[in-house]
Image: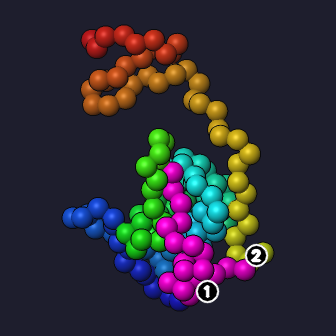
């Protein structure tokens, strides 16, 4: 399996990226294994993947994970929920995913992924700036203040 794979993008008019096939396959297996029987927010999903792939992956795990996640969305294998915050889940039962993808990693094969026991704590100091030109500014205590 040497070469590259052209990924897809779920948004019409946007293009996928060409990435290394081995990295694609590793992240695809990890994403599908993590989402089997679970619904995770974007942050939780990226944290689990980054933790599970730490040290054994060459490159930026977050960038590759986002690219593969968008590809799997475009291929209708995973979907976003309508809940707030949005969560990701398998669109089809694992047996149908196996049929679409071929082989499914056996327990103990491939990547050992650890799920976080709790959500990471919020960043210290509150949000300082968000949006274009500081449209939603707060001070360190979280109190709003006007734009300057």
Q: Position of residue 93 (x, y in %)?
A: 57, 73
Q: Going 46% across and 53% down the picture, which residue do you hit?
A: 81
**Residue 93, magenta (yes or no):** yes
For label 2, the SS is: loop
Q: Position of residue 13 (x, y in %)?
A: 21, 64
Q: Is residue 57 among what the camera can see?
A: no
Query: Along the horizontal axis of the image, is 123 left or right of 18?
Result: right
Query: How was this image coloured?
Result: rainbow
Is mark 2 in CB contact (under 8 Å) with mark 1? no
Say left or right for 142 vs 105: left
Q: Identify the residue at horizontal 54%, vertical 80% (top origin).
A: 96
**Percent position of residue 85, x then y:** 48, 42
Crowd class of label 1 (few under 14; some 14 to 19; many from 20; radius 10 Å): few
Seen in the picture, residue 31 relative to 114 is either above or below; the reply is below
Which residue corresponds to mark 1? 103
Viewed as shown, does residue 102 lie left or right of 74?
right
Q: Nearer the viewer, residue 112 or 80?
A: 80
Quadrant including the C terminus: top left
The residue tagged 2 is 107
Residue 31: image quadrant is bottom right
Q: Is residue 99 visible?
A: yes
**Local crowd size for mark 2, using a 10 Å CA cut-off: few (<14), some (14–19), many (≥20):** few
Residue 139 drawn above or below residue 121: above
- Residue positioned 67% across, 79% down in the render: 105
Asked if residue 67 is among those painted magenta in the image, a careful observer would answer: no
Q: Judge from the rendering whether residue 91 lies leftward or rightward of residue 144; answer left or right.
A: right
Q: Count numbered badges in the picture.
A: 2
Region rendered in magenta: 87-106
């Amino acid at each position: 399996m040497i070469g590259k794979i052209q990924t897809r993008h779920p948004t019409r008019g946007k293009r996928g990226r060409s990435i290394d096939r081995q990295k694609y396959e590793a992240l695809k297996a990890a994403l599908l294994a993590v989402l089997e029987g679970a619904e995770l927010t974007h942050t939780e999903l990226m944290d689990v993947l980054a933790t599970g792939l730490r040290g054994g992956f060459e490159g930026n795990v977050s960038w590759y994970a986002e690219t593969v996640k968008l590809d799997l969305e475009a291929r209708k294998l995973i979907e976003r929920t309508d809940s707030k915050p949005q969560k990701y889940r398998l669109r089809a039962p694992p047996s149908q995913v196996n049929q679409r993808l071929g082989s499914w990693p056996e327990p103990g094969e491939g990547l050992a992924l650890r799920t976080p026991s709790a959500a990471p704590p919020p960043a210290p100091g509150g949000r300082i700036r968000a949006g274009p030109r500081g449209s939603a500014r707060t001070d360190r205590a979280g109190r709003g203040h006007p734009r300057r």
